[in-house]
Image: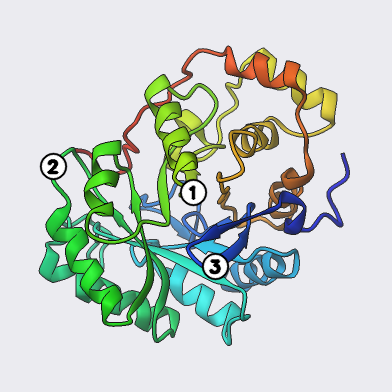
């Protein structure tokens, strides 16, 4: 499989509310640093390299970028890199961000935002990105408690024009139902990949039935999570990868895109070659036999919780 000229348009499209995006997007979590995201000793990524990756992503048709104000390392902020690289923003570019978690200037995790604090987090994203409104804001949570007050606070900001669309991250089906009783939900962003549990699969299908975009994270990293992809893929994954002339990471990503037309991918990288490979996955088609073989794999470390630093229940 060659990947040099493949555009993100090859992945098809889906809508986040009234915003049409290509199904292969870009996640900014890994952009500000080398190595593991959120690590205290993270080495900042070269600014020019990060800017080049973002600009190349847009050149290759990416029009959905996932970010957050808490994506930063010493000297580098994902939001500010996006602003530097891409402003003035293309008309079709959709930037989705997350609120709820926060980190202090030293990188230490703070308690999740209260309803009153969420406005400050939204305003910080606006400032860093240089926008007068945010396309999509996902409320990221931990645990199973009610989200009504927090989601209601974001719904008020949507009514005020600071937010165009709302989504959820790291949630369960009852959270989605609760949020929908307050305001429309355009996307759910949860951990998902090969070996997903039956409960995770059921939730993904529920979103599809309701025309809600499902946006998996860690679909490549799997058990590696914030540290990135591991080398412990099963023999089945490697066999299928060799058959297509691609990497195991590309097979993992392609598998998620085959789970439904409402599934959007947001692989992240600071490497230009990996960026091209990730975007090329949008044209990779797996056979029914290959999908069955991958579906039969054991859970492989998947868990409903994201288990990011500072995000544990």
The quadrant of the image that shows the C terminus is top left
- The figure's colour scheme reads rainbow
Residue bearing mark 2 = 145
Element assignment for label 2: loop
Measured in 3D between alpha carbons, the distance from the residue under mark 1 to the one under mark 3, in whole angstroms, is 13 Å
Q: Earlier in the sequence, mark 1 or mark 3?
A: 3
Q: Nearer the viewer, residue 255 or 155?
A: 155
Image marks 1 and 3: residues in contact by CB distance under 8 Å: no
Q: Earlier in the sequence, mark 2 or mark 3?
A: 3
Q: Is residue 111 visible?
A: no
Element assignment for label 3: strand
Residue bearing mark 3 = 19
Q: Nearer the viewer, residue 309 or 280?
A: 280
Q: Is residue 266 visible?
A: yes
Measured in 3D between alpha carbons, the distance from the residue under mark 1 to the one under mark 2, in whole angstroms, is 25 Å
Residue bearing mark 1 = 211
Q: Position of residue 116 (x, y in %)?
A: 11, 70
């Amino acid at each position: 499989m060659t990947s040099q000229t493949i555009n993100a348009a090859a992945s098809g499209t889906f809508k986040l509310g009234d915003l049409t995006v290509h199904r292969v997007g870009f996640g900014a979590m890994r952009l500000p640093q080398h190595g593991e995201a959120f690590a205290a000793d993270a080495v900042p990524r070269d600014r020019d390299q990060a800017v080049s990756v973002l600009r190349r992503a847009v050149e290759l048709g990416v029009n959905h970028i996932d970010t957050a104000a808490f994506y930063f390392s010493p000297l580098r902020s994902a939001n500010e890199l996006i602003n530097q690289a891409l402003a003035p923003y293309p008309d079709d570019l959709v930037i989705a961000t997350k609120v709820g978690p926060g980190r202090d200037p030293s990188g230490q995790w703070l308690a999740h935002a209260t309803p009153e604090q969420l406005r400050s987090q939204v305003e910080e994203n606006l400032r860093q990105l240089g926008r007068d409104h945010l396309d999509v804001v996902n409320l990221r949570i931990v645990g199973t408690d009610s989200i009504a007050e927090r989601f209601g606070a974001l719904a008020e900001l949507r009514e005020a024009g600071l937010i165009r669309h709302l989504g959820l991250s790291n949630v369960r089906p009852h959270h989605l139902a609760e949020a929908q009783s307050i305001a429309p939900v355009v996307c759910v962003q949860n951990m998902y990949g090969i070996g997903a549990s039956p409960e995770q699969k059921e939730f993904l299908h529920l979103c599809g039935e309701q025309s809600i975009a499902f946006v998996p994270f860690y679909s490549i990293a799997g058990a590696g999570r914030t540290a990135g992809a591991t080398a412990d893929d099963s023999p089945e994954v490697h066999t299928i990868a060799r058959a297509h002339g691609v990497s195991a990471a590309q097979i993992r990503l392609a598998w998620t895109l085959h789970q439904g037309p409402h599934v959007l991918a947001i692989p992240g990288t600071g490497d230009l070659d990996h960026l091209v490979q990730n975007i090329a996955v949008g044209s990779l088609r797996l056979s029914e036999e290959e999908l069955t073989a991958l579906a039969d794999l054991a859970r492989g470390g998947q868990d409903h919780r994201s288990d990011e630093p500072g995000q544990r229940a």
